[in-house]
Amino acid sequence: MSLKPQQRLELLDGHRRTLGRVEIERVQGDLVFGRFTPAEDFVAVEGLFADYIEAANDQLLSAVADLDQTIASLGLSFRAEDGSDLVGIADVQIGEGTINFRLPSREEQASTRQGPWLSKVCEATELVDEITGKNSASQQD
């Protein structure tokens, strides 16, 4: 998905709850800046973003790293008006009616699309190897 100014998106968490609405203001390389209007479900995570901004302003780097990891674990994504999804966004910061984030690279987008499929192939291969006795434990000479 290519983003452009004035484009409107919904911010979703990993449970597909709508956290808010975003209007893109500008895109600079892989960085995106926009306006954020919270939805009802945003209340559940609002404190994380407030704590992140406070820690960043106070230069509490270990707290910023921990909060960044917690925010990343929310599984945030966007849904466009046409129903398409943008997943794998990173470095999401929300505060005072604004949002900024980093877009995934083309390689990250490809691995996100292939990830579940590739994971299932690996699981199936391991299962076949186990059943046929080709796993490392049964190949002892």
Image (cartoon, rainbow, N blue to C red):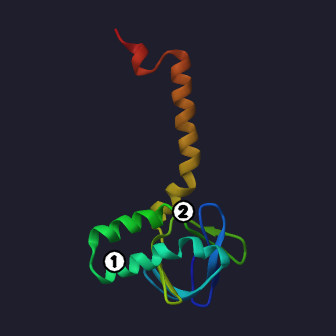
> Crowdedness of circle 2 by 10 Å Cα count: few (<14), some, many (20+)?
some
Q: Which residue is mark 2?
A: 75
Q: Are marks 2 and 1 in contact (CB under 8 Å)?
A: no
In the image, is 4 to the left or to the right of 73? right
Instruction: Give the residue displayed 64% in from the left and 68% down from the top.
Output: 85
Q: Position of residue 122 (x, y in %)?
A: 52, 36
Residue lying furthest right: 82
Tell me if I can see residue 1 in this picture: no
Q: Amino acid at mark 2?
A: Gly
In front here: 60 or 84? 60
> Crowdedness of circle 1 by 10 Å Cα count: few (<14), some, many (20+)?
some
Q: Which mark is residue 55?
A: 1
Tell me: residue 81, above or below residue 88. below
Q: How many marks?
A: 2
Image quadrant occupied by the C terminus = top left
Tell me: residue 37, above or below residue 117. below
Q: Which badge, 2 or 1, comes first in the chain's sequence?
A: 1
Per the image, label 2 sits on a secondary structure element best described as loop
Disc 2 to disc 1, how far (Cα)?
Answer: 21 Å
Q: Position of residue 15 (x, y in %)?
A: 64, 61
Instruction: Give the residue displayed 54% in from the left and 30% down from the top.
Output: 125
Instruction: Give the residue displayed 40% in from the left and 68% down from the top.
Output: 68
In front here: 50 or 75? 50
Instruction: Give the residue displayed 53% in from the left and 76% down from the top.
Output: 46
Q: Position of residue 107 (x, y in %)?
A: 46, 61
Image quadrant occupied by the N terminus = bottom right
Tell me if I can see residue 122 in this picture: yes
Q: Amino acid at mark 1?
A: Ala
In the image, is 35 to the left or to the right of 57? right
Tell me: residue 141, above or below residue 2. above
Q: Position of residue 79 (x, y in %)?
A: 65, 72
